[in-house]
Structure formats: C-alpha cells, structure tokens
Amino acid sequence: MRNLIIIMSIGFALYSLTAYGKEETRQMMGNKDMMMKSGSMKEQHTIMEHTSMMETETIEAKAQLRNNKGIEIGNVMFTQKDNGVEINVEVNNMPQGVYAFHIHENGLCDTPDYKSCGGHFNPFGKKHGFLNQEGPHAGDLPNIEVNSNGKGYMRVMTSRMTLRKGEMNSLFKEGGTAVILHQGPDDYISDPAGHGGARIACGIIEEMN
C-alpha cells in the first residue's frame, strides 16, 4: 500500500510538471506572437510616416529675371501643389504697360536676344494661345501688367506643367527651362508666340533645396 501511494505521488508530480510545461510554452508562444504583431505595427507605422512625408514634401523652384544689361528686374517663384504648379511673378523698375510672359524650352539666357532659350515649353505639341482651339502651349501664361510705379505682380495656377522630375511636362527636364518677358502683350492666339515682340528679360528656372 505504501508503495502504491509513492507511485501515485510520483505520477501526479510528473503530470503537474508536464501541464506546467505546456502552459509555459503557450505563454511563450503567445508572447512571441504579440512581439511579432508589435513589430509589424511598428513597421506599418514607419511606412505610414514615410508615405505622409512624401505626400507633404514641398517642391519649389525660382528664376531671377534679368534684362540684357544683366540688371535684375524681378523674380518668379514656382511651388508644386496637388492640382498643378503655382507661379508667383513680381517685376519692378519697368515702364508702365502690359507684357507677354512665357516659359521657354531651354534653360539658357544668352544675351542680347535670349534666343538660346528656344521656343515655348510645349511638351504636348499644342499651338500657341489660350484663344486658339488647338492650344495652348504648356508654357503659355497670362500677360503681366506693370503699373505707373514700375511694378507688376501676377499669381497663376496651372496644371499643364509639373515640378516633379521624370514626368513628360516637368520643368526640370533635361536641358532645363527658362522664363521670358517680352516687350509687348500676348494676343493669346497667334502661333507660335502671340506677337509679344522682342525678348527683354530672361531667367533660368532652378530647383530650390
């Protein structure tokens, strides 16, 4: 009888150890699963943060307008928005009047005539002018009006261009782009340049860091 009690005690002890081992294993597996889930959540959070930073990243560019004497007469700021590019133009020390303003296809401003900047920025092969049924060029912009104090300001939003590199209509294409101020107004219909007259100021569009 005594031997039977000893044998039963040993059996119960072994059973208890086995049950404890299984429970401990379940807890360890559960903790591991929680750690894996936690790691996965951290990775997802990092990815979301990175994506958010990419979406809110600001791309900007600028151009300094100089006449053929090398005198700065204004500046142009470009900001990438969700629906296109916002362009802010400011000129000063100019005779009162209305002037054609365009973006041209080469990032060159060789004096005295600025012909090195080529024709209008036109990646889609359109005709010139807002009033042209086959237009406008991507680089066509409204005229800028200069007041009696010699100052002019214009803000434009356009979806025909982008500051994102690698896209067909990017202002940061190979060879660059430039802005040109003409001596007279654009008639918005005559191809290829709207009869704006001579090119009197130029600025190379450069990315801002």
Image: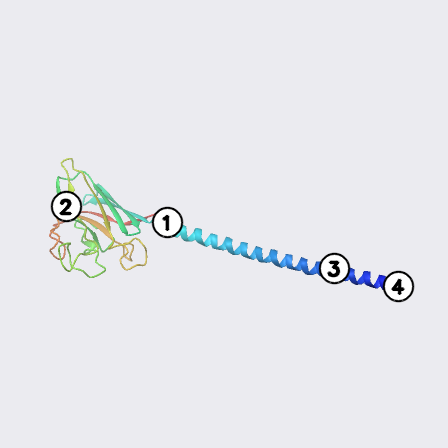
Question: Looking at the picture, how far across and down is residue 195, in whole percent?
Answer: 11, 52
Q: Quarter-wise, where is residue 149 in the image? A: top left
Q: Earlier in the sequence, mark 1 or mark 4?
A: 4
Question: Looking at the picture, how far across and down is residue 127, in whole percent?
Answer: 16, 59
Q: Earlier in the sequence, mark 1 or mark 3?
A: 3
Q: Compare residues 123 and 37 and report the one nearer the observer.
A: 37
Looking at the rendered structure, the secondary structure element under dot 3 is: helix
Q: Which mark is residue 99?
A: 2
Viewer-nearest of discs 1 and 2:
1
**What residue is pinned by disc 3?**
17
Around disc 3, counting alpha carbons within 10 Å, would you say few (fewer than 14), some (14 to 19), or many (20 or more)?
A: few
Q: Which mark is residue 56?
A: 1
**What residue is pinned by disc 4?**
1
Give how far apart the Cα atoms at labels 1 and 2 are: 35 Å
Q: Would residue 94 appear left or right of 11 to someone viewing this image?
A: left
Give how far apart the Cα atoms at labels 1 and 4 are: 82 Å
Residue 109 seen anywhere in this rendered image of the structure: no
Viewer-nearest of discs 3 and 4:
4
Viewer-nearest of discs 2 and 4:
4
Around disc 4, counting alpha carbons within 10 Å, would you say few (fewer than 14), some (14 to 19), or many (20 or more)?
A: few
Give how far apart the Cα atoms at labels 2 and 4 are: 117 Å
Q: Where 146 falls versus 35 (above or below)?
A: above
Q: Compare residues 67 and 44 and report the one nearer the observer.
A: 44
Q: Amino acid at mark 3?
A: Leu
Tell me whether the residue at label 1 lies in contact with that at label 3, contact meaning CB atoms closer than 8 angstroms: no
Q: Amino acid at mark 4?
A: Met
Q: Amino acid at mark 2?
A: Tyr
Q: Would residue 143 appear left or right of 40 to someone viewing this image?
A: left
Q: Earlier in the sequence, mark 3 or mark 4?
A: 4
